Image (tube, rainbow, N blue to C red):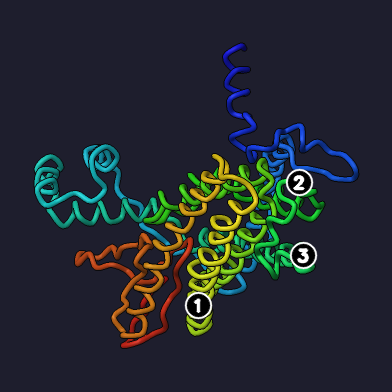
């Protein structure tokens, strides 16, 4: 207990969280001022569990009937014939065996090379999520981001720092917490925590690791900004992110419904909004404000550097996703796009092993191109 108490004292040391001339005692609620407390964040765990229950009901009572009305159905998949040797190789060694491995497996099983290749294609397809699951997930996220964005506008439209970003430092850190800020933060943190709790069950893309980093970076940034009373900046960051996420999830919904022209139009708008909000406004307004202005009010301290470091982590993820978006836009404009760069597409079960191009991807970039040359092309 002594060790835990000592670690707690070090963790909550004033110099880590607050400017040098302040202590936690200076942020006690008084004279009508209410300050954010770390204990306020405990409520996010039960709220995250509530989000999971609401999501379960939404996906089955709303998203599933909506998918049916749009003609979205699951593709019938052939289950592979059970083969102990191939299953063992699939689970423990490789899901995409090379020719040398295939030759060895052929000898063990007494199958032809094409039979082994077909078995592995079908086995990989069995683990891939169907379009209905993707539609449910995209619908849930789109509804949340839309409502969160509307809530953020309501919470911020009458605040001076919404129009003049440097105002976030006015009277810092003695800034009273508003009810709107409390609920905005609580809802957003609970939602992202629910995503972390569900991440192993949700659709996995090729940028799965980047998604994990993004979710944890967001939660860390929100929790730290709450404890260090960077709430004003935090609300602006949340609003910026939600604006483009609405369009991304909307594009995916129309993609699954095969409304390709609508999907393409939303994708173009999404790409523009993503670039403007996350590669222009975020670094040149938000990060500039958190990096340049605070030293004018107080000497830099650990919290100042850590908060900006987490913002830079998010910016690096934005650049990574923007690269994928722009690459797909280039292929879309020059007619060379054949599939989504980030999606784990379902494979044809024919002997030629060509890749099917009717699947889609997720998380920060993607959409389906219209029919050209008699075929469909996917893009982010």
Residue 215: x and y in percent read 52, 49
Label 1 to label 3: alpha-carbon separation: 26 Å
Residue 302: x and y in percent read 54, 39
Camera-side residue of 137 and 170: 170
Task: Give the label on residue 159, or none.
Answer: 3
Q: Which of the 4 quarters of the picture holds residue 333?
A: bottom left
Residue 223: x and y in percent read 62, 43
Please name the residue shown 24% across and 68% down the image.
Answer: 354
Residue where numbered disc 2 is placed: 174
Classify residue 285 as left or right of residue 104: right
> Given this view, does label 2 or label 3 mark the residue nearer the observer?
2
Q: Tell me if I can see residue 110 in this picture.
A: yes
Quadrant where the C terminus lies? bottom left
Dot 3: element: loop
Label 2 to label 1: alpha-carbon separation: 37 Å
Residue where numbered disc 1 is placed: 272
From what the image shows, is residue 258 above or below residue 50? below
Please name the residue shown 60% across and 49% down the image.
Answer: 192
Q: Tell me if I can see residue 60 in this picture.
A: no
Dot 1: element: helix
Quadrant where the N terminus lies? top right
Q: Earlier in the sequence, mark 2 or mark 1?
A: 2
Classify residue 67 as left or right of residue 61: left
From what the image shows, is residue 31 above or below residue 294? above
Q: Earlier in the sequence, mark 1 or mark 3?
A: 3
Q: Earlier in the sequence, mark 2 or mark 3?
A: 3
Classify residue 200 as left or right of residue 342: right
Task: Give the label on residue 300, or none.
Answer: none
Dot 2: element: loop
């Amino acid at each position: 207990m002594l060790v835990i108490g000592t670690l707690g004292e070090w963790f909550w040391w004033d110099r880590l969280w607050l400017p040098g001339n302040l202590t936690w005692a200076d942020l006690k609620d008084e004279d009508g001022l209410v300050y954010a407390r770390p204990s306020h964040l405990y409520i996010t765990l039960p709220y995250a569990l509530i989000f999971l229950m609401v999501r379960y009901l939404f996906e089955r009572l709303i998203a599933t009937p909506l998918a049916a009305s749009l003609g979205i159905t699951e593709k019938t998949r052939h289950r592979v014939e059970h083969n102990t040797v191939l299953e063992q190789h699939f689970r423990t060694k490789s899901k995409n065996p090379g020719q040398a491995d295939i030759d060895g497996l052929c000898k063990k099983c007494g199958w032809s090379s094409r039979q082994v290749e077909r078995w592995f294609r079908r086995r990989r397809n069995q683990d891939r999520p169907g379009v209905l699951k993707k539609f449910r997930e995209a619908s849930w996220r789109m509804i949340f981001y839309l409502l969160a964005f509307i809530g953020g506008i309501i919470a911020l439209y009458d605040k001076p720092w919404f129009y003049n970003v440097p105002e976030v430092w006015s009277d810092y850190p003695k800034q009273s917490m508003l009810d709107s800020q409390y609920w905005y933060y609580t809802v957003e943190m609970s939602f992202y925590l629910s995503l972390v709790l569900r991440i192993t069950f949700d659709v996995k893309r090729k940028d799965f690791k980047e998604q994990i980093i993004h979710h944890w970076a967001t939660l860390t940034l929100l929790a730290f900004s709450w404890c260090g009373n960077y709430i004003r900046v935090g609300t602006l960051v949340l609003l910026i992110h939600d604006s483009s996420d609405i369009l991304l999830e909307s594009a995916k919904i129309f993609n699954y419904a095969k409304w390709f022209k609508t999907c393409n139009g939303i994708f173009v708008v999404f790409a523009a909004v993503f670039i403007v909000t996350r590669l222009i406004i975020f670094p040149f307004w938000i990060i500039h404000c958190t990096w340049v202005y605070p030293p004018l009010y107080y000497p830099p301290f650990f919290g100042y550097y850590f908060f900006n470091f987490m913002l830079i982590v998010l910016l690096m993820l934005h650049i990574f996703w923007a690269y994928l978006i722009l690459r797909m836009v280039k292929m879309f404009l020059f007619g060379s796009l054949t599939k989504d760069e980030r999606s784990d597409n379902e494979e044809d079960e024919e002997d030629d092993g060509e890749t099917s191009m009717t699947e889609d991807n997720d998380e920060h970039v993607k959409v389906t191109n219209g029919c050209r040359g008699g075929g469909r092309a996917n893009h982010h």
